[in-house]
Amino acid sequence: MNTLSYRTDSVSAEKAERKWYVIDATNQVTGRMCAQIASILRGKNKPSYTPHADTGDYIIVINADKVRFTGDKWNQKEYLNYSLHPGGLKVTLASEMLTKFPIRIIERGVKGMLPKTKLGKAMVKKLFVYEGADHPHAAQKPEVLILKTPKPKDTY
Protein backbone atom coordinates (compact mmCIF):
# COMPACT_ATOMS: atom_id res chain seq x y z
CA MET A 1 0.00 0.00 0.00
CA ASN A 2 1.28 3.45 -0.90
CA THR A 3 1.44 5.74 2.11
CA LEU A 4 1.44 9.36 1.12
CA SER A 5 1.64 12.12 3.64
CA TYR A 6 -1.01 14.76 3.12
CA ARG A 7 -0.09 16.65 6.22
CA THR A 8 0.67 20.33 5.96
CA ASP A 9 3.63 21.45 7.99
CA SER A 10 3.16 24.62 9.99
CA VAL A 11 6.14 26.85 10.53
CA SER A 12 6.57 28.14 14.05
CA ALA A 13 7.73 31.69 14.75
CA GLU A 14 11.08 30.38 16.01
CA LYS A 15 11.80 28.38 12.83
CA ALA A 16 10.74 31.11 10.42
CA GLU A 17 13.44 32.58 8.21
CA ARG A 18 13.17 36.36 8.28
CA LYS A 19 14.69 38.79 5.84
CA TRP A 20 15.13 42.56 5.97
CA TYR A 21 13.77 44.69 3.14
CA VAL A 22 14.14 48.39 2.32
CA ILE A 23 11.27 50.14 0.54
CA ASP A 24 11.63 53.60 -0.95
CA ALA A 25 8.32 55.44 -0.49
CA THR A 26 9.12 58.18 -3.00
CA ASN A 27 6.04 58.77 -5.22
CA GLN A 28 4.32 55.62 -3.93
CA VAL A 29 0.54 55.69 -3.47
CA THR A 30 0.11 55.37 0.27
CA GLY A 31 -2.75 52.87 0.51
CA ARG A 32 -1.39 50.47 -2.08
CA MET A 33 2.07 50.60 -0.55
CA CYS A 34 0.72 49.98 2.97
CA ALA A 35 -1.32 46.99 1.78
CA GLN A 36 1.76 45.34 0.28
CA ILE A 37 3.84 46.12 3.39
CA ALA A 38 1.15 44.58 5.65
CA SER A 39 1.15 41.44 3.51
CA ILE A 40 4.92 41.09 3.82
CA LEU A 41 4.83 41.72 7.59
CA ARG A 42 2.27 38.91 7.94
CA GLY A 43 4.39 36.57 5.80
CA LYS A 44 1.81 36.07 3.06
CA ASN A 45 4.50 36.42 0.39
CA LYS A 46 6.10 33.13 1.50
CA PRO A 47 5.01 29.60 0.69
CA SER A 48 5.41 28.76 4.40
CA TYR A 49 2.69 31.26 5.48
CA THR A 50 1.10 30.24 8.75
CA PRO A 51 -1.86 32.36 9.90
CA HIS A 52 -1.39 31.71 13.63
CA ALA A 53 2.37 32.42 13.75
CA ASP A 54 4.46 35.52 13.15
CA THR A 55 6.52 34.40 10.13
CA GLY A 56 6.80 37.73 8.32
CA ASP A 57 9.85 39.77 7.36
CA TYR A 58 11.24 43.07 8.61
CA ILE A 59 10.45 46.20 6.59
CA ILE A 60 12.37 49.48 6.53
CA VAL A 61 10.55 52.34 4.78
CA ILE A 62 12.65 55.35 3.77
CA ASN A 63 11.56 58.74 2.38
CA ALA A 64 8.22 58.61 4.20
CA ASP A 65 7.83 62.35 3.65
CA LYS A 66 7.58 61.84 -0.14
CA VAL A 67 4.49 59.60 -0.31
CA ARG A 68 1.49 60.61 -2.36
CA PHE A 69 -2.26 60.26 -2.27
CA THR A 70 -4.56 59.97 -5.27
CA GLY A 71 -7.25 62.50 -5.94
CA ASP A 72 -7.76 65.35 -3.47
CA LYS A 73 -7.03 63.27 -0.36
CA TRP A 74 -4.43 65.76 0.88
CA ASN A 75 -7.32 68.12 1.68
CA GLN A 76 -10.12 65.59 2.29
CA LYS A 77 -8.59 62.71 4.26
CA GLU A 78 -8.90 63.19 8.01
CA TYR A 79 -7.04 61.43 10.82
CA LEU A 80 -9.17 61.24 13.97
CA ASN A 81 -7.84 61.04 17.54
CA TYR A 82 -10.15 60.85 20.50
CA SER A 83 -9.01 61.46 24.08
CA LEU A 84 -12.04 59.67 25.63
CA HIS A 85 -13.17 62.94 27.22
CA PRO A 86 -16.24 64.91 26.12
CA GLY A 87 -15.26 67.16 23.22
CA GLY A 88 -11.89 65.41 22.96
CA LEU A 89 -11.99 64.68 19.22
CA LYS A 90 -9.02 66.04 17.28
CA VAL A 91 -9.13 66.09 13.50
CA THR A 92 -5.92 66.36 11.44
CA LEU A 93 -5.89 66.66 7.66
CA ALA A 94 -3.46 64.54 5.64
CA SER A 95 -1.58 67.66 4.50
CA GLU A 96 -1.03 68.70 8.14
CA MET A 97 0.00 65.16 9.06
CA LEU A 98 2.62 65.20 6.30
CA THR A 99 4.22 68.39 7.60
CA LYS A 100 4.09 67.44 11.31
CA PHE A 101 4.38 63.64 11.46
CA PRO A 102 5.06 62.05 8.04
CA ILE A 103 6.06 58.75 9.64
CA ARG A 104 2.60 58.29 11.18
CA ILE A 105 0.89 58.26 7.78
CA ILE A 106 2.57 54.97 6.89
CA GLU A 107 2.53 53.53 10.41
CA ARG A 108 -1.21 54.10 10.82
CA GLY A 109 -1.95 52.79 7.33
CA VAL A 110 -0.06 49.55 7.88
CA LYS A 111 -1.29 49.05 11.45
CA GLY A 112 -4.90 49.33 10.29
CA MET A 113 -4.34 46.49 7.81
CA LEU A 114 -2.87 44.06 10.36
CA PRO A 115 -4.83 41.86 12.80
CA LYS A 116 -6.07 43.59 15.96
CA THR A 117 -4.54 40.94 18.27
CA LYS A 118 -1.30 40.23 20.12
CA LEU A 119 0.00 38.78 16.87
CA GLY A 120 -0.73 42.02 15.02
CA LYS A 121 1.07 44.04 17.68
CA ALA A 122 4.13 41.81 17.27
CA MET A 123 4.00 42.24 13.49
CA VAL A 124 3.86 46.05 13.61
CA LYS A 125 7.07 46.05 15.70
CA LYS A 126 8.92 44.77 12.62
CA LEU A 127 8.12 47.96 10.70
CA PHE A 128 10.66 50.80 10.75
CA VAL A 129 9.75 54.07 9.03
CA TYR A 130 12.13 57.01 8.43
CA GLU A 131 11.63 60.44 6.90
CA GLY A 132 14.89 60.68 4.98
CA ALA A 133 16.93 58.27 2.92
CA ASP A 134 19.16 57.20 5.83
CA HIS A 135 18.43 54.40 8.29
CA PRO A 136 20.47 52.76 11.08
CA HIS A 137 19.87 49.17 9.94
CA ALA A 138 22.83 48.69 7.60
CA ALA A 139 24.21 45.89 9.80
CA GLN A 140 21.20 43.70 8.92
CA LYS A 141 22.10 43.91 5.20
CA PRO A 142 18.58 44.67 3.95
CA GLU A 143 17.59 43.94 0.38
CA VAL A 144 15.96 46.62 -1.75
CA LEU A 145 12.37 45.68 -2.48
CA ILE A 146 10.53 47.26 -5.40
CA LEU A 147 6.79 47.15 -4.90
CA LYS A 148 4.34 46.26 -7.66
CA THR A 149 2.55 49.26 -9.07
CA PRO A 150 -0.64 48.78 -11.07
CA LYS A 151 -0.70 49.77 -14.69
CA PRO A 152 -2.71 52.91 -15.42
CA LYS A 153 -6.12 52.26 -16.91
CA ASP A 154 -6.74 53.18 -20.51
CA THR A 155 -8.92 56.21 -21.01
CA TYR A 156 -12.02 55.76 -23.11
Image: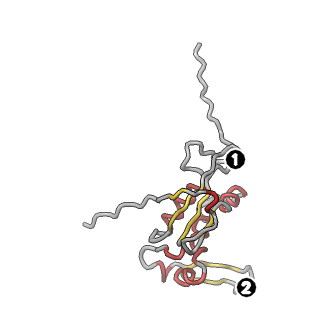
State the mark number for residue 129: none
Q: Which residue is drawn at the image coordinates 57% and 59% (left, top)? A: 38
Residue 128 x/y as whole percent: 62, 65
- The outermost residue toward the left is 156
Q: For the residue labelled by badge 2, is the local secondary structure a helix, a strand or a loop?
A: loop
**Residue, disc 1:** 13
Q: Quadrant of the N terminus?
A: top right
- Which of the pair 37/120 is nearer the observer? 37
Residue 146 x/y as whole percent: 47, 59
Q: Which residue is drawn at the image coordinates 63% and 45% (left, top)? A: 50
Q: CA distance from mark 1 to mark 2?
A: 43 Å
- The outermost residue toward the front is 139
Residue 95, above or below 21: below
Dot 2 amino acid type = Pro
- Which of the pair 145/89 is nearer the observer? 145
Dot 1 amino acid type = Ala
Mark 1: give few (<14), some (14-19) or many (20+) Cα within 10 Å.
some
Residue 49, above or below 92: above
Residue 10 x/y as whole percent: 65, 39
Q: How is the image coloured?
A: secondary structure
Q: Which residue is drawn at the image coordinates 72% and 57% (left, top)? A: 118
Front tag of 1 and 2: 1
Q: Which residue is drawn at the image coordinates 44% and 58% (left, top)? A: 148
Q: Are marks 1 and 2 in contact (CB under 8 Å)?
A: no
**Residue, disc 2:** 86
